[in-house]
Image: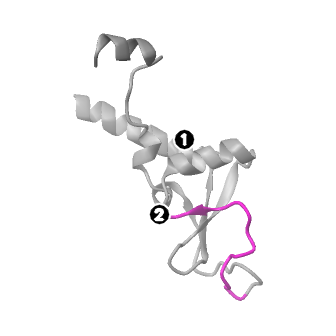
Amino acid sequence: MTVSLSRTLPREYGVDPLEMISVSEVMTEFSESFEAGNGRGEPAAFLDVLAYADETCRAVAEEMAMTGIMSMPVIDRENGRVCGSVSAHDLLVGRRRAVVRESERRR
């Protein structure tokens, strides 16, 4: 990093661990008996704030920060059904996993 660039960056530049973890890795899965929608397992089109299983934890953390919602249903993008939920606590667990992996890699 050049000296002038290092002066403009207020902190060390690095990859956000939440950018490397998908929601499906940290979410709480619902059992197969869970039925979304009207109780007949219909797609969850009625939900306003939600997360997709294949998106990054960082995207969900940003959505939580903007909306103030600390828990969201997780939707399977392929079939549009609710497959679980993700909370701020789940995201912190994911971040902890990434930090542990990074510290082990450095050893």
Label 2 with label 1: CB-CB less than 8 Å:
no
Instruction: Locate the N terminus by quadrant.
Output: top left
Tell me if 4 is positioned left or right of 33 in this view: left
Residue 92 lies, in percent from the top left, at 54, 41
The residue located at (50%, 78%) in the rendering is 78
Label 2: element kind: loop
Label 1: element kind: helix
User: Closer to the observer: label 2 or label 1?
Assistant: 2
Q: Which mark is residue 54?
A: 2
Tell me if 76 is positioned left or right of 47 in this view: left
User: What secondary structure predominates along the stretch shown in magenta?
Assistant: loop
Instruction: Locate the C terminus by quadrant.
Output: top left
State the residue lying farthest toward the bottom: 40
Residue 104 lies, in percent from the top left, at 27, 34
The residue located at (68%, 76%) in the rendering is 44
State the residue lying farthest toward the front: 4
Which residue lies under the disc numbered 1?
A: 92
Label 1 packing within 10 angstroms: few (<14), some (14-19), many (20+): some
Q: Amino acid at mark 1?
A: Leu
Q: Nearer the viewer, residue 6 or 60?
A: 6
The residue located at (44%, 45%) in the rendering is 19
Question: In the figure, residue 36 lies in which quadrant?
Answer: bottom right
Tell me if 36 is positioned left or right of 105 in this view: right
Q: Amino acid at mark 2?
A: Asp
Which mark sits nearer the N-terminus, 2 or 1? 2
103 relative to 64, above or below: above
The residue located at (45%, 57%) in the rendering is 25
State the residue lying farthest toward the left: 107
The stretch in magenta equals: 40-54
72 relative to 92, above or below: below
Residue 46 lies, in percent from the top left, at 75, 74
Label 2 packing within 10 angstroms: few (<14), some (14-19), many (20+): some
